Image (spheres, rainbow, N blue to C red):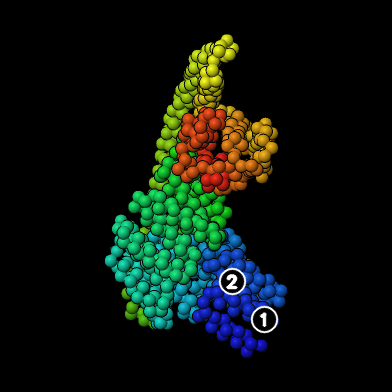
Amino acid sequence: MRTVIFTILILLFTLTAIPFESKIDSLEDLLSKTNNDTVYIEVCTALSKEYFNSSREQALLYAKKALDKAVAIKYAKGEGECLHKLGLHFYRIGDYNVSFDYYNRSIAIKDSIGDRSGLAKSLNNIGNLFKKRGEFQKALEYHARSLEIKEELDDKRGIANSLNNIGIIYFSTGNYEKALEHYIESLKIRQELDDQLGIAMSYTNIGLIYKSQGDIDKALESYENSIAIQEIIEDMGGMAFNFNNIAGVYEEQKDYEKAMEFQLKTIAIWQSLGHKSGIAYAYTHMGQINEAMGNADEAIRLFRESLVLQRSMDDKRGIAICLCLIGTNQLHRVEYGNALINGKACLELATKIGAEIEIRDAYELISNAHAGLGEYAKAFEFHKLYKTKSDTLLEQRLSTSITELQTRQEMDQIEIENELLKKDAVIFEKDAVIKEIELEKKDALLLRRATQRNAFIIGFALLLVLSLVIWRAYQTKHKLSALLNERNAVIESTNNKLGILNKELNDFAYIVSHDLKAPLRGINALATWISQDYGDKLDEAGRENLKLLDSRVHQMHRLIDGILKYSKEGAVTQETETVKLNKVVTDLVDLLAAPKHIDVKVESTLPDMEGNESQLTHLFENLISNAIKFNDKAKGEIKIGHSEDNGNYKFYVADNGPGIDDKYKEQVFKIFQTLHNKDEYESTGIGLSLVQKIINNYGGKIWIESEVGKGCIFWFTLPKS
């Protein structure tokens, strides 16, 4: 039995040198042939690892197969390890709540069966999880427990890794001195073990400290030392990480050309490795560099490329980060509606996975978007949430610092007491040194009091800092309240003025309509009289001219009605209600009564939404009637439907008519513009302008996809709320 398992494990190790596709095929072939349950679990685990960067769905499937087998055969150690692997899977895709659940289940099993090494590993990973969520005090507790077990087992490599992880937590809380102390201690152990990979990692972390302290030369030197080792051991992923760090150094110095140079090296490595996660985060960083350079278009393109990859991997934290960056970019473009949509999507996802930093950033984005839209009450509401979350994260950092100070004080106290005990023991042996010991006791007492006094001063200083934070929060709240009241007054005044302007605009439109129609009616009457009284005396050309005159008069009537309708759709006092779009469109199809050779089909049940029924009816009526009117096929087809897209309804009206050339796709939305002879088709050139205006008022957008001779699709979006 053991011989078989050993042979299989040797084979698994050998597979690491085989290309990805061959390795997968070999593992799956091995899985289909083995009758050994333990080997089955090991192979499923290996397949899960191999699939992780190419298919998260397959990776999760094999991880769960391994767990199911371990549970079925009551293999407790295997079950604990499989739960650990699933925790790691969800940690990597940013779903921290699910990851935490799997790790906790793993810890319970490993603790019950006495698997101390496995327990230390799971505790370590939960520590990393809390670090990712910004809960540094909890992270420190779990890493300390993991370190204690590794010291008990005399696991040198594990001790070095735990010291490194604790250093990262101190680094994250800004305690660079303590972080450097742990990094150097970890480095010494790794050098004793000749752990080249670990040594390179330590140099990288030390470089990050120097960078944070502003010592750029030492930071770059540490990164280069790390890269030199990684080149020898062919650690391509580590090199990519260091190139990314160097890019960050040059970005902070505003040397964007150098930053981009190293970021391109980063992405080249990730692409050669086929590492989707690395590529995605490299795109994100390149987008941030372009943002800093003022290349907003390139920045948002890269953020969207990253978002596509993050979604393909279901990396929830990565998705939330990209949504926030895209929203911030849109905020700078004054696309407040789109920024708001992405901010809310980021908040929903970050809340689901418990990503505290992304929740804070989403609150800030949503607040700014509402402010841009003039919705100051909502802006103030989300600013308060942003401020509360920022204060909470600050308190967590302060709590970690306070705990660290308390720990230092306790250690000093223990050292002092140990010294006192030693001196007390000496009293009984050597009476000659009693006085000296008493003096040392006094010194120790003074030292203890000094330590307590210093702790009190530090605590008082922290209290002052917290008081300052609270006072500033109160000032900000007071100023924002005053600003909100002032803005509300401005809004109320503006609304009153808009009401008056809307009434004047409507009155003006009706007056202009009446004054323009009056002479037209006269012209029409005169043409009718001439036709009746002199029709038999006119030749064919004269009668044709009278018909043309009558046609032009009716066309002018339609144009005036169109202008009147166009002006009315701009009013800000439109009432909203729940509009049943499916009924509206179905009724319109019946009312417009398309010719028998044209088939009009509603392909999905259209949703109910809040809006103005008259406006939405005009919108669909114009698009459907145009599709019927201009269809030139012997068997015409018109399709209407919708889908849901990121907080919006996305509608389409498609036909198989003549299509629209690319150069006219923008022109058709301009008022009075038409692609056809007005004598050939009855058209004012206002319909699509009216459609675009209605959609813009709702915060949506409209665009055309078309190929000449094969028809076109009018796409448009309307927000769900």
Tag 1's secondary structure? helix
Residue under label 1, please give it.
Answer: 33
Report crowding for label 2: few under 14, some 14 to 19, many 20 or more residues within 10 A (C-alpha). Answer: many
User: Residue 419: percent from the left, percent from the top?
Assistant: 39, 74
The answer, for residue 136, to whether it is visible in the render is no
Q: Is residue 568 above or below residue 122?
A: above
- The answer to which of 505 and 397 lies nearer the viewer is 505
Identity, as a three-letter code, of the amino acid under mark 1: Lys
Q: Is residue 265 above or below residue 311?
A: below
- How far is disc 1 from disc 2 in space, using C-alphas? 18 Å
Nearer to us of marks 1 and 2 is 1
For residue 102, what is the image quadrant? bottom right
- The answer to which of 650 and 202 lies nearer the viewer is 650
Identify the residue shown where x is 66% and y is 71%: 65
Residue under label 2, please give it.
Answer: 48
Identify the residue shown where x is 46% and y is 78%: 157
Identify the residue shown where x is 48% and y is 21%: 505
User: Residue 86: percent from the left, percent from the top?
Assistant: 60, 68
The reply, left or right, for residue 373 in relation to residue 615 is: left
The reply, left or right, for residue 105 in relation to residue 307 is: right
Identity, as a three-letter code, of the amino acid under mark 2: Ser
For residue 214, what is the image quadrant? bottom left
